[in-house]
Amino acid sequence: MVVKMRLARFGRRNQPFYNIVVTQARTARDSRPLEVIGTYDPIPKADSYDTSGKLHKDIKLDKRRAQYWVGVGAQPTETVWRLLSMIGILQPKVNPPLPKQRAVPRWTGLFNTKKAPAPKKPNAPAPPPQPK
Amino acid sequence: MPPRLRSGGNGLSPLLLTCVEGLSQRGGSRLLAGLTAIIQNQSQSTITLQSSSRSPPCSAPFSTSAPCELNREQRRMWAWLRGQGKKFKTAPDPDQFGPDGETAPGNGGGPNYVGSFDGTQVFKNNKVFKSEPVLSEKARDAIFSAVVEDQLPLKAVSQKFGVDMRRIAAVVRMRSIERNWIASKKPLARPYQRAVLAMLPQADLNPGEMPFEPINDIHVHMATMQQLFHPTSESRHFTRRDAAKAFGAHILPPDDKLRIPEMIDLERKLASGVPSEEAHDEFVAQTARTEAARAKRLKGRRTMAELNRTRVATDRFEFRFENFNSSAVGRTGRARTAIGWRYGVPSHDRKPDQVKIPTKME
């Protein structure tokens, strides 16, 4: 079975708090994991006496254990990958480029009542009738 | 011929007039004088039964029967109204208040607080509750200037004024905020401050006064509340440190638990005849040294914490990664100090007596 590095949600309603855990992929989200290697508090906080309005998020992580589990093939989820890539344990995943926006939406002209002017027909001679 | 009262236009009821006539026939001249006053008051359309005697008004002053006796509650009420309650008879003159509601000094005006008979009783019916004095504005200014302008150590300021160190720190913080507000032209609630301070006894912290509060109290550990039989040799010099050790290895001696242990040295010097000024100078120097050492220790702790932390700034937030050892989870893996939310432990949110309000500000 695959060993994953993922988040387990704790905390309260509207007040999440996550354990960063290493666990078997098919176990329940909040069940007892193989190891808890950190915590992630996703609620941004301001420093006391700081009026600049800058917010921060607190993460605790055992870097050594995180590197070990990555080294033995544990598979981080997207969120954990993003966190681990911030401190250089993993390469940041480059998001695939967004599909190019079409210049003209597909429905253009569907509701257009005005008929577009017909293209001018070239004054070419009529094709010869094909023999039956 | 008894004097007749004109009945036209005075609005008295026929029954009352009948009584008056009857009284005058019986010679109730005293009561008649009072009733005449009533009739004169009729133009103001209020009837006030006045009595010429000092007894409280009776419901039927024209009656010849003996007046009803007051019960105990009524007697007490009238005694209060003639004594302590006398000053509440007249409402304070609103002209004596300034535009902000403050009292003009010197004219004896201002609000009549119900309980403040001797200045300390806040609630009328609760004689037991006496408000503790609060620091006056003058005292707060003195503390602030000693800390900020004279740069005295907090412990020395605490010892000088007899005010707890935590209160000293609070005064300095509040004064700093107030100064910032004044500098940024933020309006201050001065009338409110004056009104509150007028209701409370204040301490000016003048030299020679009683100390404001105890400043060197120690917390009594539960383990030291029991009596202990500890055999020791008679020749042994048994100190407070030994006593603490006898109670348990984790018990600190009182000298280490004191908030300002330097005061022990100060008192020893004063008792041994060192001149007071010299002893106090040494005390200030000693407290400055210990406070500098503590500041250095705290700074080192902050530096170490910062070394253990990685800050990653993104467009929106700063992510702070703190490194730690996840294997320190104790023998059962469920140590209280272990990282993360604990497994198999219910949350006690809905249990009674769980304090959820924050107890400190960091």
Image: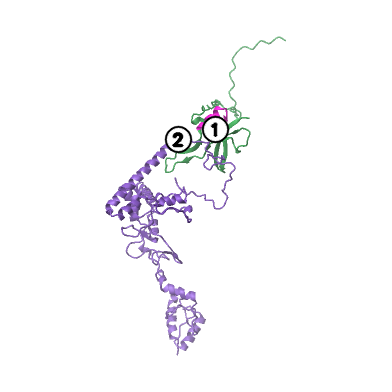
Chain colours: A green, B purple
**Residue type, mark 2 in image:** Asn
**Residue type, mark 1 in image:** Val
Whether residue B142 appears in this view of the structure is no
Q: Position of residue A123 (x, y in %)?
A: 59, 14
Please tell me whether residue A64 belongs to the stretch shown in magenta. yes
Residue at horizontal 41%, vertical 37%? B303
Instruction: Report crowding for label 1: few under 14, some 14 to 19, many 20 or more residues within 10 A (C-alpha).
Output: some
- Predominant SS along the magenta part: helix
Q: Position of residue B153 (x, y in %)?
A: 33, 48
Q: Secondary structure at mark 1?
A: helix
Where B69 falls versus B198 (above or below)? below
Q: Outermost residue, bottom direction?
A: B1
Discs 2, 1 touching: Cβ within 8 Å:
no
Residue at horizontal 45%, vertical 51%? B246
Q: Outermost residue, top direction?
A: A131
User: Nearest the camera: B110 or B124?
Assistant: B124
**B361 relative to B264 in the view: left or right:** right
Q: Secondary structure at mark 2?
A: loop
> Which chain is indicated by disc 2?
B
Give the residue number, with chain letter if any, for mark 2.
B308
**A52 relative to A37 in the view: left or right:** left
Give the residue number, with chain letter if any, for mark 1.
A80
Q: Outermost residue, right direction?
A: A132
- Asked where in the image residue B37 lies, by quadrant, the reply is bottom left
Q: Quadrant of the N terminus of chain B?
A: bottom left
| The label number, if any, that marks residue B145 in the structure image | none
User: Nearest the camera: B100 or B48?
Assistant: B100
User: Nearest the camera: B192 or B328?
Assistant: B328
Q: Position of residue B290 (x, y in %)?
A: 35, 45
Q: Quadrant of the C terminus of chain B?
A: top left
Magenta residues, start to end: A63-79
Where B140 falls versus B16 (above or below)? above
